[in-house]
Image (cartoon, rainbow, N blue to C red):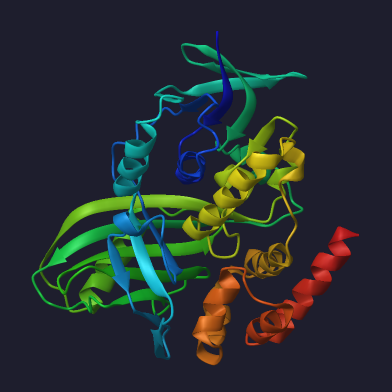
Amino acid sequence: MLHYNYIFTGTGLSALMTVYKMVQSGKFSDKSILLLDENSKKANDRTWCFWSENNENWEPIIHKKWNSALFANQDFKIDIDLNPYKYNQIRGLDFYNFVFDVISKQENITFVNQKVINYEESADLITLQTETDSYTCDQLFNSILDPYEVKNQTQYPLLQQHFIGWFIESEQEVFNAEQATFMDFSVEQKGNTRFMYVLPTSKTEALLEYTLFSHKHLETAEYESELENYIQKLGITNYKIIEKERGSIPMTCFPFWKNNTVHLLNIGSAGGWTKASTGYTFKNADKKSTQLVRFLETQSDFREFHKMSKFWFYDLLLLDILHRKNELGATIFSALFKKGNPKLIFKFLDEETSFKEDIHVIWKCPRRLFIKALFRVIFKSK
């Protein structure tokens, strides 16, 4: 049975970011690291986007940048100048290739294409079982989400950000290649929070995603019908679908960190690293993985890693509202962007604002909804 200092179960965004930064730090070359995943990471299976002022780590693999964004609903459209930010797109396969190119050159890191079946923790080590082999480690980073634990509780609201996206090539030049459509709520809401998300890479090419924040998934045909309707509304009559993608991201403030132990740390979606109120993952994982590598340099008890933040509470308020009245998403986000300062909103969503700035952002939203949610959350916790 092979033994490693660190084992990562699952090699998604958070795991690969962490390992990449461990290599970059130069302080873990004497540690044996095993990555276990049933997925070989050879496909372009997803797209990540994030806003930032600079991208020292990821600049080589940014596929496209936008300087402005569009927010829209049935009543108005707002062009948002993102300066000093840029909205960045990274394709999944580019990220995987970039990171694996780095870690494949490290003699202390091993990737094994196997599915993890189970793991058990004792006082001194953790034992893992895959479909074919067994391994032991001193510390385990788990990014395999157990959905049943979150679904089978009622204290913390659970929504899904779910979508189907088409990357299309149109015969008509209809896209503004310099502007991303951040949220377009002009689509019929049908009792949910539904919007279109458009990332143009040229005048004739774009990724369009029909996205919902809601409790249940749709039949595939409904996502695709809405995509077809929106494409037609843009004035596109002839196009071809180059690629398709689909996904579902849990949106919850469930305290995943309570499952951390001395030797086991849950990361990624399994650790609550996804921004609960928006489903944005890349920026949060980037920050958390940096914090984790710094933590590993001086500490070893994973129960000490998580730090509670005021932003967790803000996210909980929004999820409480959308859990109860899912159709209010368009109203809330429209009020936020129509009345608020976009740069401050992005800073708030990045969890970098002061309390005074928090109030400026939150107060642009429908106040009565958030005050009621505040009292519900406070009294429910008692």
335 or 288: nearer the viewer:
288
Vertical side of 281 occupied by 349: above or below? below
Q: For this view, does 337 lie left or right of residue 380?
A: left
- Give percent across and percent down for residue 146: 60, 37
Task: Identify the residue at image location x=70%, y=29%.
Answer: 263
Count of numbered tags:
0
Residue 327 falls in image quadrant: bottom right
Q: Position of residue 343 (x, y in %)?
A: 51, 82
Q: Position of residue 176 (x, y in %)?
A: 23, 79
Compared with 139, 282 (above or below) is below
Q: Position of residue 119 (x, y in %)?
A: 62, 21
Furthest residue toward right? 382
Q: Is 109 or 234 nearer to us in this picture?
A: 109
Q: Is residue 329 above or below residue 110?
A: below
Residue 290 in the figure: left or right of residue 151: left
- Residue 30 quadrant: top right
Residue visible at 72% across and 55% down in the picture: 156
Locate residue 267 relative to residue 263 in the image: left or right. left
Identify which residue is drawn at 42% across, 50% down.
247
Res. 121 image quadrant = top right
Quadrant for the N terminus, please: top right
Quadrant the C terminus occupies: bottom right
